[in-house]
Amino acid sequence: MRRPQGRTLIFGHTFEENVRRIKLVVLVALAVVGLAFLGCGSPTPKRPLELTVLHTNDTLGSTEPCG
Amino acid sequence: MKEVRKTSENVLLLDGGNTIFPGDRPLVQQTQGQVIVEAMNLLGYDAMVLGSEDFRLGLDVLRQRMEEAEFPILSANVVMAGTDQLFAAPYVIKKIGDHKAAIIGLTSEEAANATGGAIVVLDPLEALQDSMDEVNKEADVVIVLSNLGTATDMQMAGEVQGIDLIIGGGSRDVLDPPLWDELSSTVIAQAGYQGEWIGVASLEMDDQGAVVGHKGAVVPLTEEFADDSEMRAFLDQYK
């Protein structure tokens, strides 16, 4: 592959090519951290539950005031 | 209800049926149960089951009341005669905290007599098992709204695995405290009749939705409880 003329080569690539590669690595790393933070890939543990159920039945149309 | 909602984070308000039918109440007769549905909307009910008495309104009126309700009116075992089409939604699933609770409705067989054969009431335990097979894919808490009476509720707790709470109706029992089926870890509650009591069932569940502790009571609505001003104003508009 022909390299751009007049550019400094580092590890056999131009400066711009290395910057692009570093950006890509940083983006992938951020995505992995983000997914881990959101809990993707493993189920979020549930917390115990305290549930209160208020209930009525057989009211048969009662609209009388209580008492 | 308002007090409990203020002090508790996860609260459901449920009804075990035979509630819309007017009985001998003139205002409810005059409105064909509409005033009751509007009052239940105001109270913020989460679900109710169709009781056999509710079918005495007739199917057309009952459908109208169901449309007006801002909460699901359930029945997993009533189908239109000659079809396999359910008359109402069989269940609803509600998210509570990190959990999902399925609320399934079951109607007693007397409903068929009230409609002159327009509906067929299926075996409630078979219908329940069908619904359980569906809701178990999604929900980890199962509540059955049963209009079948306490004897059948006890049988149900013993025969159908995985029910956490049965809110009963139909037999007008004051279960204070609620019954507890040790083998199946099912709480069975019912709160009397004619609006004279309200039941309170508190369940403590582990991270998998299994009942690990429970307490409950049926509270008589004596004159110690003042009329709610909002409800009084609502009823006064019908005078």
Image: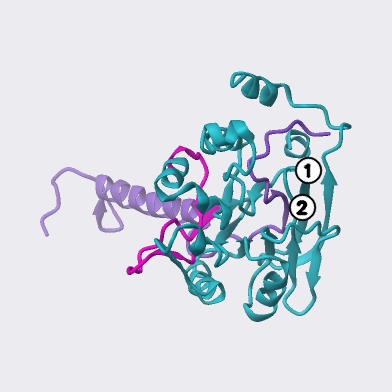
Chain colours: A purple, B cyan
Picture coordinates of residue A16 (x, y %)?
Answer: 26, 45
The structure residue drawn at horizontal position 39% and vertical position 46%, both measured from the top left corner, is B60
Residue B140, placed above or below residue B58? below
Q: Which residue, given by chain and number where applicable, does mark 2 sit on?
A: B192
Report the Cα–Cα distance between label 1 and label 2: 7 Å
Q: Is residue A27 visible?
A: yes
Q: Is residue A38 visible?
A: no
**Residue B19 part of the magenta segment:** no
Residue B38, placed above or below residue A41? above
> What kind of element bears circle 1?
loop
The structure residue drawn at horizontal position 72% and vertical position 77%, both measured from the top left corner, is B184
The structure residue drawn at horizontal position 79% and vertical position 45%, both measured from the top left corner, is B197
Residue lying farthest to the left in this orientation? A2
Q: Chain of mark 2?
A: B
Residue lying farthest to the right in this orientation? B224
> What kind of element bears circle 2?
loop
Q: Nearer the viewer, residue A40 or A50?
A: A50
Identify residue type, mark 1. Glu
Predominant SS of the magenta segment: loop
Q: Which residue, given by chain and number where applicable, does mark 1 sit on?
A: B196
Q: Chain of mark 1?
A: B
Picture coordinates of residue B16 (x, y %)?
Answer: 64, 54
Identify residue type, mark 2. Gly
**Residue B78 part of the magenta segment:** yes
Specify the quadrant of the image occupied by residue B26: top right
Do the numbered discs 1 and 2 sit on residues whose CB atoms are within 8 Å?
A: yes
The structure residue drawn at horizontal position 57% and vertical position 53%, both measured from the top left corner, is B53
Q: Which residues are magenta?
A: B67-94
The quadrant of the rendering that contains the N terminus of chain B is top right
